[in-house]
Image: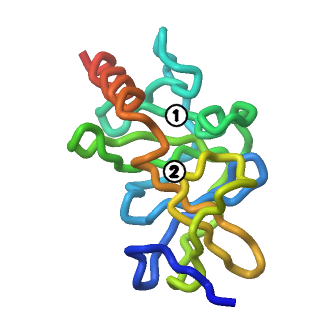
Amino acid sequence: MKIMTIEGITETGRFLAFMLHGEVYALDIMQVREVLDYTEITTVPRMPDFMRGVINLRGGVVPVVDLRLKFGMPATEKGVNTCIVIMETDIDGERALIGALADSVREVLDLEPDQIEPAPRIGTRLKTEFIKGMGKKNDEFIIILDIDRVFSADELSGVQETGLAAEA
């Protein structure tokens, strides 16, 4: 059986693996700035459900989203391992920081191109345009997210405006 690899992935990739509702997800480590212990989130009125609010990160305001809600799962509840993954994403051609709640962070892992397959057309909880690929390590699937495609441009603009309004 020929294994298909993802177009554009030609060398070993490094990913931050984290848990959401019992499943392993991963982000390209180049988009991850840092991982923070859970901190109180200031809610902002009239935002989408998945937008949990903002946090203060060294004097700057960073919007925090709940990927579980975005993906149609139950909301993230604060636990001993709950954390906020600070990532960099593209909003209208500009780089911006966004925090994402995670149940826990597992590890930074290296995946070879032959360990990553294209996203399946059916059978996942996500729409496949959000998925960069499906990693396999030790008989476990890892859903590799394309964070720049998880949110629509309108959603990200709203998130960015929330951060800017909170700074004012």
Q: SS at mark 1?
A: strand
Q: Mark 1 highlights which residue?
A: 65
Residue at x 38%, y 74% (from the top left corner)? 8
The N terminus, quarter of image = bottom right
Distance between the Cα atoms at labels 1 and 2? Answer: 19 Å
Q: Check disc 2 and report the residue beneath it.
A: 129
State which quadrant residue 82 falls in: top right
Q: Is residue 157 above or below residue 18?
A: above
Q: Residue furthest bottom?
A: 1
Q: Quadrant of residue 2?
A: bottom right
Looking at the image, can residue 111 be seen? yes
Q: Earlier in the sequence, mark 1 or mark 2?
A: 1
Label 1 amino acid? Val
Question: Where residue 8 is drawn, which disc sits there?
Answer: none
Q: Determine the residue positioned at 42% across, 35% down.
A: 152
Vertical side of 164 occupied by 83: above or below: below
Q: Position of residue 67 (x, y in %)?
A: 59, 40
Residue 75 placement, left or right of 8: right
Residue 62 seen from this side: no
Q: How many marks?
A: 2
Quarter of the image with the C terminus is: top left
User: Percent position (x, y) of residue 41?
Assistant: 52, 26
x and y, in percent, of residue 12 in the image: 45, 83
Q: Are marks 1 and 2 in contact (CB under 8 Å)?
A: no
Q: Residue at x 75, y 72 (%)?
A: 140
The three-letter amino acid code for the residue at tag 2 is: Glu
